[in-house]
């Protein structure tokens, strides 16, 4: 048998070994070390990912600004040479080049957004307009791609961003109302010679009273207005300029503190932008003449609807969505002369019609008379256009003399058949419930001299509506015989569109004869210009819109931009 004390010793030793924690501590220590290592590894991976993401984000930002650098470089070239883009070759630079002054290796390239049917292979100087200018908005659209980050085997950075920029020129058609001079045309009033502006009469001097044209109570200008002169408000009158809740502004480029003559706007109400009036605005010039534009060439290259002498155009919007135009051309200089051509264009109305003056057209202006031949048609060697009707297709009508809008008066003369004119007066298109033009059809009327509203002498005028962009490059938009045919109340001359004129024309006499103004800006003109009027402006180019293209395959940063907007 084993002694008792020996057994007790063995038991005590075993109990001590069983209660020892030395091995457990090691296990715990190893576990903590393992978890810590995993956490460190995770943090490292996370930090690396964050560094890569930050680097990628930085590269993409640099690529965006590289694209913008290309945009600005192209804009600079346009403003150095406004016709820079017309070569086509200047617009196509698909091979990336270094951003000037960049130390990070960023590059950019650019290509045009071609119109359907065109590419770099068939865009030439003679087709540049058709290939590159959006027919709706009148803008030149370009894709600019910027590159940054690691380079490929060709030395081009692999991270890219693409933007599409629309280039346009500030235009008189940006405004409902545009005048160079707010006084009467010297061609109509010899007392107004000297071509001064209101603000140029200083030291108490005043312009001849007969030259002044006032804004009267009841005049409504629902849209932005601009003049290189100042607005003369009739004493105590409260005309309204601008539309509440819009960015409409009433602007003057005159070097004065107020848009109104003698800083006295009377009781005029200015609504719209902040601020609603802008004095000392940037000068926006009109072309000097029709001959200084490309419109004749445009007409020759687009169906060659070019006529010489007095031409009458009747427009009819058909129920099936098509449009017809009856065109009568009578260039003879006597009432016995017959018309040289009478054309009916059905479902194929041209986009631009140009009318020139022939020999025998006088240099003096008689802007309130009409000449009818023995057949009851307007005639004469001058490039006058008589027009009326409804339209639903885009069209620009250009005359190097006058455009006369046939009105709705009981004795208004009209080419045969007369009933077609009196039943279809003015110039109108489809509208919404508020009378605002709708759809994509815009009409441009460009006259080298006057755009006139027909009003035979001593006849009480009737209300008339004109839906068009009106430009008179050397003279005025006016109502014929505005001082006769008194009526109470005065009817409204309603215009939905834009009016731009060298000298302000008269449409009525305050409180008596002629018309009150009821003018509304056609907001479509901001994005849908009448055909070929994109080039009517002589101002510098600017970026009107920029769109950032979204990458369609983020894994490779391959950017695609199916841009179709203005």
Image (tube, grey):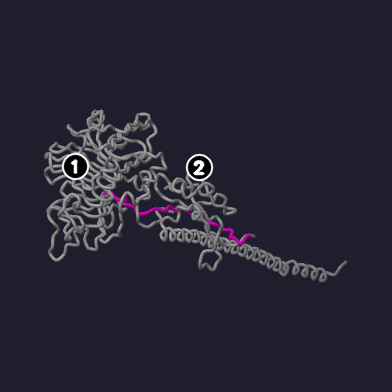
Q: Which residue is mark 2?
A: 117
Compared to 79, does 434 lie above or below? above
Q: Which stretch is magenta?
A: 154-177
- Give the mark count: 2
Secondary-structure class at tag 1: loop
Determine if the magenta segment contains residue 97.
Answer: no
- Location of residue 272 in the rendering, given as x and y in whole percent from the top left corner: 27, 52
79 on left or right of 237? right
- Location of residue 428 in the rendering, given as x and y in whole percent from the top left corner: 29, 37
Report crowding for label 1: few under 14, some 14 to 19, many 20 or more residues within 10 A (C-alpha). Answer: some
Which image quadrant for residue 367? top left
Secondary-structure class at tag 2: loop
335 on left or right of 42? left
Residue at 32% x, 53% y: name it: 287
Report crowding for label 2: few under 14, some 14 to 19, many 20 or more residues within 10 A (C-alpha). Answer: few
- Distance from label 1 to label 2 (Cα)? 47 Å
Q: Nearer the viewer, mark 1 or mark 2?
A: 1
Q: Which residue is mark 1?
A: 368
Q: Is there any visible trace of residue 245 in the rendered image?
A: no
Residue lying farthest to the right in this orientation: 1
Which image quadrant for residue 208? bottom left
Which image quadrant for residue 438? top left
Determine if the magenta segment contains residue 157.
Answer: yes
5 on left or right of 496? right
- Looking at the image, which is closer to me, 122 or 389? 122
Residue at 57% x, 62% y: name it: 149
Compared to 349, does 361 lie above or below? below
Quarter in which the N terminus is drawn = bottom right
- Location of residue 106 in the rendering, given as x and y in whole percent from the top left corner: 54, 63
């Amino acid at each position: 048998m084993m002694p008792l004390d020996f057994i007790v010793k063995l038991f005590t030793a075993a109990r001590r070994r069983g209660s020892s924690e030395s091995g457990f501590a090691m296990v715990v220590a190893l576990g903590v070390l393992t978890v810590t290592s995993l956490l460190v590894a995770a943090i490292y991976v996370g930090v690396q990912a964050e560094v890569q993401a930050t680097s990628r984000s930085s590269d993409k930002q640099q690529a965006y600004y590289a694209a913008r650098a290309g945009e600005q470089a192209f804009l600079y070239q346009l403003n150095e040479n406004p016709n820079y883009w017309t070569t086509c070759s200047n617009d196509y630079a698909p091979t990336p080049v270094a951003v000037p002054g960049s130390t990070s290796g960023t590059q950019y390239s650019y290509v045009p957004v071609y119109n359907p049917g065109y590419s770099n292979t068939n865009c030439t100087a003679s087709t540049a307009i058709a290939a590159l200018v959006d027919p709706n908005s009148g803008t030149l659209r370009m894709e600019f791609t910027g590159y940054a980050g690691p380079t490929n085997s060709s030395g081009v950075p692999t991270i890219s961003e693409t933007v599409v920029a629309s280039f346009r020129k500030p235009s008189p058609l940006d405004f409902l109302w545009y005048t160079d001079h707010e006084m009467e045309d010297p061609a109509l009033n010899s007392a107004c010679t000297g071509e001064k502006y209101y603000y140029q009469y200083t030291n108490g001097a005043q312009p001849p009273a007969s030259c002044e044209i006032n804004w009267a109570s009841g005049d409504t200008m629902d849209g932005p207005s601009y003049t290189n002169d100042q607005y003369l408000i009739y004493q105590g009158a409260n005309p309204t300029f601008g539309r509440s809740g819009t960015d409409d502004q009433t602007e003057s480029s005159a070097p004065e503190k107020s848009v109104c003559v003698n800083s006295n706007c009377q009781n005029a109400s200015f609504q719209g932008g902040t601020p609603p009036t802008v004095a000392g605005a940037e000068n926006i010039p009109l072309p000097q003449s029709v001959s200084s534009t490309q419109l004749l060439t445009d007409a020759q290259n687009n169906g060659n609807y070019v006529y010489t002498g007095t031409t009458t155009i009747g427009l009819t919007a058909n129920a099936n969505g098509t449009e017809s135009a009856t065109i009568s051309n009578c260039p003879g200089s006597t009432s016995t002369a017959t018309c040289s051509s009478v054309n009916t264009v059905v479902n194929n109305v041209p986009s631009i019609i140009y009318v020139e003056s022939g020999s025998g057209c006088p240099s003096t202006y008689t802007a309130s008379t009409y000449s009818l031949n023995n057949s009851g048609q307007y005639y004469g060697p001058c490039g006058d256009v008589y027009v009326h009707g409804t339209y639903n297709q885009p069209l620009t009508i250009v005359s190097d003399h006058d455009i006369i809008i046939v009105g709705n008066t009981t004795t208004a003369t009209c080419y045969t058949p007369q009933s077609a004119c009196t039943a279809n007066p003015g110039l109108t298109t489809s509208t919404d419930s508020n009378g605002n033009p709708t759809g994509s059809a815009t009409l441009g009327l460009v006259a080298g001299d006057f755009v006139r509203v027909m009003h035979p002498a001593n006849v009480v005028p009737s209300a008339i509506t004109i839906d068009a962009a009106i430009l008179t490059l050397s003279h005025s938009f006016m109502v014929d015989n505005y001082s006769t045919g008194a009526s109470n109340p005065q009817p409204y001359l309603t215009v939905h569109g834009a009016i731009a004129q060298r000298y302000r024309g008269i449409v009525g006499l305050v409180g008596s004869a002629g018309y009150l103004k009821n003018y509304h800006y056609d907001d479509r003109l901001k994005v849908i210009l009448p055909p070929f009027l994109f080039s009517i402006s002589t101002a510098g180019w600017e970026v009107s819109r920029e769109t950032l293209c979204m990458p369609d395959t983020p894994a490779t940063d391959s950017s695609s931009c199916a841009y179709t907007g203005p």
